[in-house]
């Protein structure tokens, strides 16, 4: 029972703990921790991105290395088709295109091939198409001969736009109209004024051909005074539109009783259309 009377001994003294907390300090610690975690995650993402990019590049390089021969075999040219050729043969077109069998379709630049083919005088337009998986197709639109041009005692073949197609030398083609009096240098250089004279002459030939059969000969030595000869008839045209002048002749033709319109007989008739409101008819002996 003595234990009930024992006195409790006091506890030893200890340093006092400061239980007060600073909210701003805790917030700063948490923000610093979050920033550290964010930086760590960003670093991980960057490392992952670089690693992934490197892996993709490596896969692409390895794929190209090992799939190149397979791709070449899959897309190599085995057939070259040429369409629309008439005056040009297929071999000439292939020489212009400079394309060989076995070349990969994916290696070709169709624009370059098109320009090469269109450099030939006979080719007005060319279309180059890749046809999966082994065909290259070249489609041509050729120029159509429309006139024989005589310049400096040499004959040249041109189309309706005045483009020189080929030189004929002394050879002629009497199915086409003959245009004489052209400057040879301007013709070969493709001078615009010379081309326009040829275009006008060809239009004139078509107009006259609707009334008179036979080959038309046009002298253009003086571009402002075209002279056309057909079946013994001689027509002179002025600087205005040849179409308007010929239409004026067509309107008055039925009234020209003395005109030898059939082109036969000994007399050569001349029709002068150079005047705006009248037509002068001269009878030759």
Image: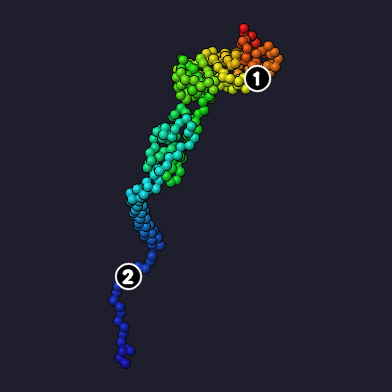
Crowd class of label 1 (few under 14; some 14 to 19; many from 20; radius 10 Å): few
Camera-side residue of 252 and 258: 258
As drawn, 198 above or below 282: below
x, y (%) of residue 257?
A: 70, 13
First in sequence: mark 1 vs mark 2? 2
Mark 1 vs mark 2, foreground winner is: 1
Residue, x 68% and y 16% (percent of image)? 253
Asked whether residue 108 appears in the rendered view, the answer is yes
Query: Could you give the CA–CA distance between mark 1 and mark 2, rounded to whole angstroms?
Result: 126 Å
Q: Left or right: where does residue 12 sit relative to residue 75?
A: left
Residue 167, picture quadrant: top left
Quarter containing the N terminus: bottom left
User: Mark 1 = which residue?
Assistant: 247
User: Mark 2 = which residue?
Assistant: 16
Number of numbered discs visible in the structure rendering: 2
SS at circle 2: loop
Residue 134, picture quadrant: top left
Q: Which residue is the extreme one toward the bottom?
A: 1
As drawn, 105 above or below 88: below
Tell me whether the residue at label 1 lies in contact with that at label 2, contact meaning CB atoms closer than 8 angstroms.
no
SS at circle 1: helix
x, y (%) of residue 6?
A: 30, 87
Crowd class of label 2 (few under 14; some 14 to 19; many from 20; radius 10 Å): few
Asked whether residue 195 appears in the rendered view, the answer is no
Quarter containing the C terminus: top right
Residue, x 60% and y 18% (percent of image)? 242
Residue, x 31% and y 85% (percent of image)? 7
Q: Which residue is the extreme one toward the front?
A: 265
């Amino acid at each position: 029972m003595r234990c009930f009377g024992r006195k409790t001994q006091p506890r030893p003294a200890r340093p006092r703990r400061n239980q007060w907390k600073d909210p701003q300090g805790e917030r700063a610690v948490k923000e610093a921790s979050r920033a550290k975690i964010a930086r760590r995650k960003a670093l991980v993402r960057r490392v992952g991105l670089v690693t992934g990019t490197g892996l993709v590049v490596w896969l692409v390089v390895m794929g190209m290395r090992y799939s190149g021969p397979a791709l070449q075999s899959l897309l190599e040219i085995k057939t070259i088709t040429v369409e629309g050729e008439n005056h040009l043969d297929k071999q000439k077109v292939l020489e212009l295109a400079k394309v060989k069998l076995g070349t990969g379709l994916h290696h070709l630049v169709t624009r370059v091939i098109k320009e090469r083919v269109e450099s030939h005088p006979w080719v007005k337009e060319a279309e180059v198409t890749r046809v999966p998986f082994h065909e290259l197709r070249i489609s041509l639109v050729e120029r159509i001969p429309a006139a024989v041009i005589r310049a400096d005692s040499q004959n040249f073949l041109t189309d309706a736009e005045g483009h020189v197609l080929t030189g004929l030398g002394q050879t002629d083609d009497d199915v086409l109209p003959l245009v004489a009096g052209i400057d040879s240098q301007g013709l070969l250089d493709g001078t615009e004024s010379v081309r326009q004279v040829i275009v006008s002459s060809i239009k004139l030939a078509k107009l006259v051909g609707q009334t008179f059969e036979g080959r038309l000969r046009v002298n253009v030595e003086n571009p402002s005074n075209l002279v056309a000869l057909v079946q013994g008839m001689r027509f002179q045209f002025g600087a205005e539109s040849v179409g308007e002048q010929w239409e004026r002749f067509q309107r008055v033709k039925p009234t020209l009783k003395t005109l030898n319109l059939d082109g036969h007989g000994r007399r050569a008739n001349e029709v002068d259309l150079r005047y705006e409101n009248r037509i002068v008819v001269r009878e030759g002996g």
